[in-house]
Amino acid sequence: MIQPYTEILSEILIPADVLQKRIAELGAEISADYAGEELLLICILKGGVMFLTDLVRHITVPTAFDFMAVSSYGVGARESTGQVRIEMDLRISIADRHVILVEDIVDTGHTIAAVLEMLETRKPKSLKVCSLLDKSERRETVAPIHYRGFEIPNKFVFGYGLDLDEYWRNLPFIGVVKT
Ligand code: IMP
């Protein structure tokens, strides 16, 4: 049986209305920066899905999107190691296109650093990162974030795309897990 989220939640870190307001701001910022251009958003599954679908509704330039899934592997089950394997690749070419990677959270930074390195070899016209959350205290490598939703403390969070054993991605807010 899956525990009700109310038993796992210690506090709501970012309420739904605050999330939505910030996402609208990010969409407006991106729209202004890419005025006159076409844009390709790449969502890293599964955590970035909620963010992507809300974000694109606030982007006013011609925008396409595609998905990729990656997994970290190497020593240590829980920690990201910098070794990233593509589980599901893009269906379209990014060559000569303006690309923004859409992520739920940048933690150690290993995932985004590895994905950026991989995508750079495909010669996009430009490649930037948009992450809803930034747990910068935990950073272990250089991971540029061009569009950042919220800086958050070093706490394990869930909801709004982020899961706890695959559940509760559907919550409209970001919550902190009870320790
Ligand atoms: P990084 O490679 O350490 O930056 O890890 C990024 C990935 O770790 C994210 O895309 C998430 O899937 C996962 N992650 C990191 N912190 C959290 C958290 O607080 N809650 C849920 N997932 C997290």
Image (cartoon, helix red, strand yellow):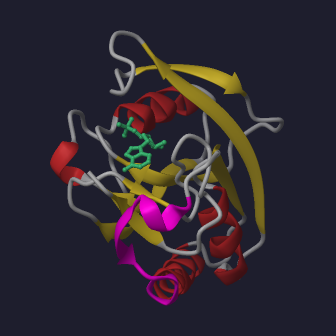
Residue at the image position 33 percent from the left and 51 percent from the top: 156
The stretch drawn in magenta includes residue 107:
no
Residue segment shown in magenta: 4-18
Q: Residue at x 58, y 74 (%)?
A: 172
Seen as rendered, the residue at the extreme left is 137
Q: Whole-percent x and y of residue 165? A: 55, 40
Identify the image quadrant of residue 169: bottom right
**Residue 17 in view (yes/no):** yes
Nearest to the observer: residue 90 or residue 172: 172
Give the residue displayed 55% in from the left and 25% down from the top.
Answer: 71
Residue projecting furthest to the right: 91
* Rendered position, 179 above or below 24: above
Q: Residue furthest top?
A: 75
Can residue 146 be spotted in the picture?
Answer: no
Residue 141 in the image: x percent, y percent? 24, 33
Q: Please name the residue shown 65% across and 49% down the image.
A: 42
In this view of the protein, which residue sits in the foreground, 64 or 131?
Answer: 131
Question: Which quadrant of the structure image shows residue 135?
Answer: bottom left
43 with respect to 136 (left or right): right
Residue 9 image point, x, y percent? 40, 64
